[in-house]
Amino acid sequence: MKKYFIPIASDFISQKEVDFIIRSNTEYLKNLNCEQIEFDQLLLVEQFYYFVITGGTEQQVLALQKKRNKKFGNEDVILLAHASHNSLPACLEVLAKLQQDDSRGKVVYLPEAATALDADHKPAISKIDGLPELQGLRIGSIGAPSDWLVASSPSFEIVKQNFGIDVIPIDLNEVKQIFQRITKEQVIDISAAFIDKAVGIYEPSLLEIYDNIKIYLAMKKLIEKYKLDAVTIRCFDLVLDMKTTGCFALSRLNDEGIIAGCEGDLNSTIGMLWAQKTFGKLPWMANPSQMNLEDNSLILAHCTVPSSLVTSYKIRSHFESGLGVGIQGEFPKQKVTIIRIGGKNLDKIWQAEGEIIESGNAEDLCRTQIKVKLDNKYSVQDLLTNPLGNHLVVVGR
């Protein structure tokens, strides 16, 4: 039977790029007997797929599916993911939300479309218990979680109940107000040290680097004001409203021992705290951007990384927007543990062990990239069949 798809993309990508991605996956789409339709045909076809072109589209998919549910009922939601532009992590976040709501869905990862998945595969997910070391810690939530974190925005009450952590809501405008008061003289020494240790500066201007340092100093003031042990920030609003990024701030704060998460993602910030207390090492938060079922590996990527975790770094722009500062770090080869905390009540954990076998420099993924090959007793297929959400936490062992 003929199947149909609609491409779903964020505003950060041009129509020309969308068309290129569709053309690049033509062979896979033909193998699936899949043909593109327009948005106004959404309710006219039965066999339907969402071709998720970029990250940041999770709410769009759910809103469209809500319309289809009124006509077709609680149908299986099929998500097509490809190997760039954070398509895969977006699909995993949507599927995690569907499963939290007891709806049915499936991710078809196009580079692996010919690989049959074991329908009876049981992901290595277990119940997570809180740690005494987490009791009474304070996480500052600067701005609400990013809109696309549809499966990763637990209530503050659930966080407190399960982990004993207090979440302190902070208006993002406080960052903006402090930012405006910081002078060039306050950032020169920090920016000079950041630049001096880099192996190269590519897209960012000196002014963009200065603005990133200002975000860091503003967040430091809020950490002191609210007596925070960790923080997460709705960082894409910095891109949209201030044309800057929080990538340096999160990198530097983590290096200083203050766990700092991206995108207002409480699940991952708690996961980072849990990993730090459990393994005694600094963790890294990243997107599962690509995977290979055959060799049981995945590529993780993000635009920020603590400098203490990498052997070198380049100063780049932020991947999705091309603005501000992103950090492209080179990880050493090492054994790692990967975790994801999630579930509707934030009471589940997926945990796997593997080894970093290489760092990457692809231009269609977030700046810092690693390839991790999982140990044989673990499977990357877990992420396709029963994900707990997008971001994963990586910690050395």
Image: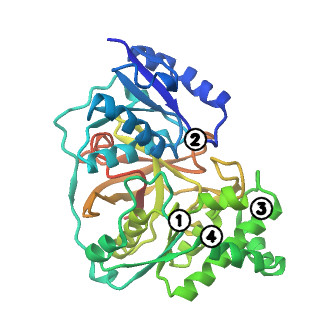
Q: Position of residue 159 (x, y in %)?
A: 33, 72
- Secondary structure under the numbered disc 3 in the rendered image: helix
Q: Which picture quadrant has residue 17?
A: top right
369 is higher (above) or lower (below) than 275:
above
Q: Are marks 3 and 2 in contact (CB under 8 Å)?
A: no
Please name the residue that numbered disc 1 is placed on. 309
Mark number displayed over residue 249: 4
Identity of the amino acid at label 3?
Glu
67 is higher (above) or lower (below) than 186:
above
User: Which numbered disc flags the more N-terminal residue, 3 or 2?
Assistant: 2
User: Which numbered disc flags the more N-terminal residue, 2 or 1?
Assistant: 2
**Distance between mark 2 and mark 1 Cα atoms:** 31 Å
Position of 2 compared to 121: left or right?
Answer: right
Crowd class of label 3 (few under 14; some 14 to 19; many from 20; radius 10 Å): some
User: Disc 3 vs disc 1: which is toward the camera?
Assistant: 3
User: Disc 4 vs disc 2: which is toward the camera?
Assistant: 2
